[in-house]
Image: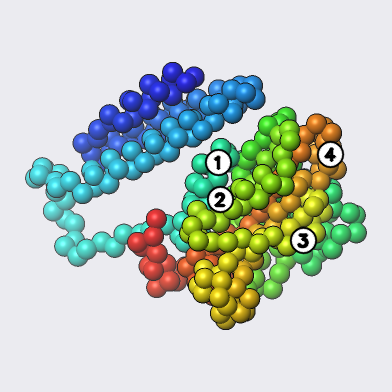
Amino acid sequence: MIDQINALTAEINSLTASDAQTAEALRIKYLGKKGVITALFNEFKELDSDSKRTLGKPLNELKNLAAEKIAELKDAAAQAPDTEVAALDLSRTAAPMPLGTRHPISIVRNEITAIFSRLGFTIAEGPEIEDDWHVFSSLNFAEDHPARDMQDTFFISRGPDVLLRTHTSSVQTRVMEHTQPPIRIICPGRVYRNEAISARAHCFFHQVEALYVDTDVSFADLRQTLMYFATEMFGPDTRIRLRPSYFPFTEPSAEMDISCNLCGGKGCSFCKHTGWVEILGCGMVDPNVLEACGIDSHKYSGFALGMGVERITNLKYQVKDLRMFSENDKRFLEEFTSAR
């Protein structure tokens, strides 16, 4: 496979496209559902652990290279002057056509995904309509846990065990049920909770969770991952702080704060003059969760972490009202036309 990766790297570096249609055809050829790189990722899933550790990074680098190269070709094609008179649409209005952009949630989610992909994490997805087992029971939630109450969870009328997922941890349990370690995934997606809509809360929002399970995974590995994420997302001067907490599916558990990116940790109204802002929860995967998913907790250990994308977006762009993300106010969205 490494020979294929090297050959494809050279091939992609030499790609050219005279127009947007050609660039799109290249995207489909290499990155589409039946593309060459997608096929390599499918082969990667069948490799042994040692091969995965060796090939994971170059394979992700190949995918990123292809995406960047094709994006450059598309940009170049879009900016190239059209000298073909026959290609002109004489019925088109002379008024400039405003271009759209990515939603701020998508911008930040893509940035989070890119950071973790550089650490070898791959994306895993699951259904938004879930069952009690994957959302609660397999994650060590007690039968009387408050999160099972109707005040927090949207249950579907088909039965008490069918619900809208309250977190993307359900994707982690689905992966662990069918995959033996090593497991290194991120789970981005939309989640739902029965909460009153306000400037600080909404009945739906977006999460990105990460899971790493292997032999000899320690809390030190978790902390190093968190430090890398914080500095990549918020800048090299960012500091982190871990505080003890409680989550049913991790033990020990912690909440992570970062030094306030507005005042540099000196204290301001945004961080309530503490110098710190909470951004995510994390911890070592509880052995009960591993056992419930068919993984030997005496042989394997792991860590998990989860963050709200809206929370990270708030910190990055200082958006004070969560409702603005779902109201589609063009004045608000146009502020992100230059963001990537």
In the rendering, at what x and y percent does residue 296 appear?
A: 82, 32
Q: Quadrant of residue 42?
A: top right
- The amino acid pointed to by label 4 is Ala
SS class, disc 2 = helix
Q: Please tell me the numbered disc located at residue 228.
A: 2
Query: Reading the chain from its start, which is encountered first: label 3 or label 2?
Result: 2
Q: Vertical placement of 116 versus 106: above or below?
A: above
Residue 203 seen in the figure: yes
CB under 8 Å between discs 4 and 1: no
In the rendering, at what x and y percent does residue 2 appear?
A: 47, 21
Residue 198 seen in the figure: no
For the residue pair 79 and 98, the one nearer the viewer reads as 79
Kindly identify which residue carries mark 3: 244
Cα gap from disc 4 to disc 2, whole angstroms: 30 Å
Quadrant in which the C terminus is drawn: bottom left
- The amino acid pointed to by label 3 is Pro
Q: Please tell me the numbered disc located at residue 292.
A: 4
